[in-house]
Image (cartoon, grey):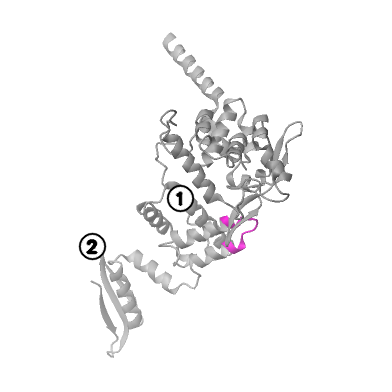
Amino acid sequence: MATIETRKNAAGKITSYRVEWYDKGKRNRQTLPTETAAVQWKELLEAVKHDTQAAQTALLRQVSKSPSFEDVALGHIERLINVREYTIKRYRGYIKNHFVGLGHLPVDQITEDDLIRWIKGMVKKGCSPKTVANVHGFIHAAMNSAVRRRLRPDNPCNGRLLPKDDTTEDKAMFLTMDQMHLIIDQTDDWQRPMWLLLIGSGLRLGEATALTRADFQLDAATPSVRITKAYQEMEDGWAVGAPKTKKARRTVALAPSTVEAIRSRVESAAPGRPIFTVSPDTLVYPQHRQWLDGWYDAVKAAEANEDNPLKIHKRPRIHDIRHSHASMMIAGGMNLYELANRLGHESIITTTKTYGHLVPDAHFRAAAMVETALNQSIAS
């Protein structure tokens, strides 16, 4: 327990107050000019179990005139330009759900130790390494904003070691065309063209649901669809906006079989209206929830088919149709640069990280290199 001792001059008048405490077995003393300051220091010490450094940090935070980190992060969001509304909504979600232990602190008083405690707290509550990395990336950007605004001298996020993703299973699932047909065969006639378009083009769901008749060139020398827009989640609901990235604005060539599957639907669509809807008479846009339900119902039906079971170890998502399209393109000889352009990836790094292991030539070359090295070793 910390104690307070009054200090007097020769005339017996109190001149100061001395707080005494033990931290890790070592006696410490601090002289303060007023009783109020001494009591405050004593209470801080006892609140942190006489940890001197923690008490000093708490005191600095009490007297700091800097805005809270939550206010700084919200200000950072307001300053963002050319960012999708869905992304803004996600950032606000980070502040609401993942700023425990950081948001209330003055931005100039947040330390590396605070970040370490925050990371451990995120892991303890069950957040995946990817979630921790995503939120940390936003915190890092908000801290950079604070540095630029001269609210603090440095960014405590620099050099942070984030938890590794130790999962042993690929998140992406790659279906064969036979498996795709098993699922698509379980869908109704109205929805089937949509699924055939997705597997034949690799489009994102939000891109496909925003398509209108004017986006298609079905009778060109090389039939294609032009992607210039996508459904996205806004602050107050869903709306058509710009594609996910700059390179997502692209032209995707279509195979004759895909053209045949979608032609009737495209040509019968009203000008300017979305082509691919979950039912002929729907008036509600978009219908992502209904498309998800339709897909998962078809997957369940395919799995339950005793005559021709799907034979998969986990339930594929709609986005796995895109992954499956990519794997088929690679198997057909498309290189990763071409694939990145077809899928609308902003960086080929994304394509390489997701699909690089599927490139057959790389595996063959690696196997040949190993064989050569082993034979040289045996010969020597």
Identify the residue at image location x=51%, y=28%.
Answer: 178
Looking at the image, residue 194 sits to the left or right of residue 269; the answer is: left
Identify the residue at image location x=67%, y=33%.
Answer: 260
Identify the mark nearer the N-term, 1 or 2.
Answer: 2
Q: Which residue is mark 1?
A: 131
Q: Which residue is mark 2?
A: 25
121 relative to 354, above or below: below
244 relative to 139, above or below: above
Which is more toward the observer, 76 or 154?
76
Q: Is residue 300 visible?
A: yes
Looking at the image, residue 374 sits to the left or right of residue 219; the answer is: left
Quadrant of the image occupied by residue 340? top right
Looking at the image, residue 322 sits to the left or right of residue 51; the answer is: right
Residue 290 percent across, percent down from the top left: 53, 49
Based on the picture, tell me whether residue 338 belongs to the magenta stretch. Answer: no
250 relative to 113, above or below: above
Q: Label 1 sits on what residue type? A: Thr
Specify the farthest residue to the top: 379
Circle 1 Cα neighbour tier, 10 Å, few/some/many (<14 / 14–19 / ≥20): some
Q: Report the quarter where the C terminus lies.
A: top left
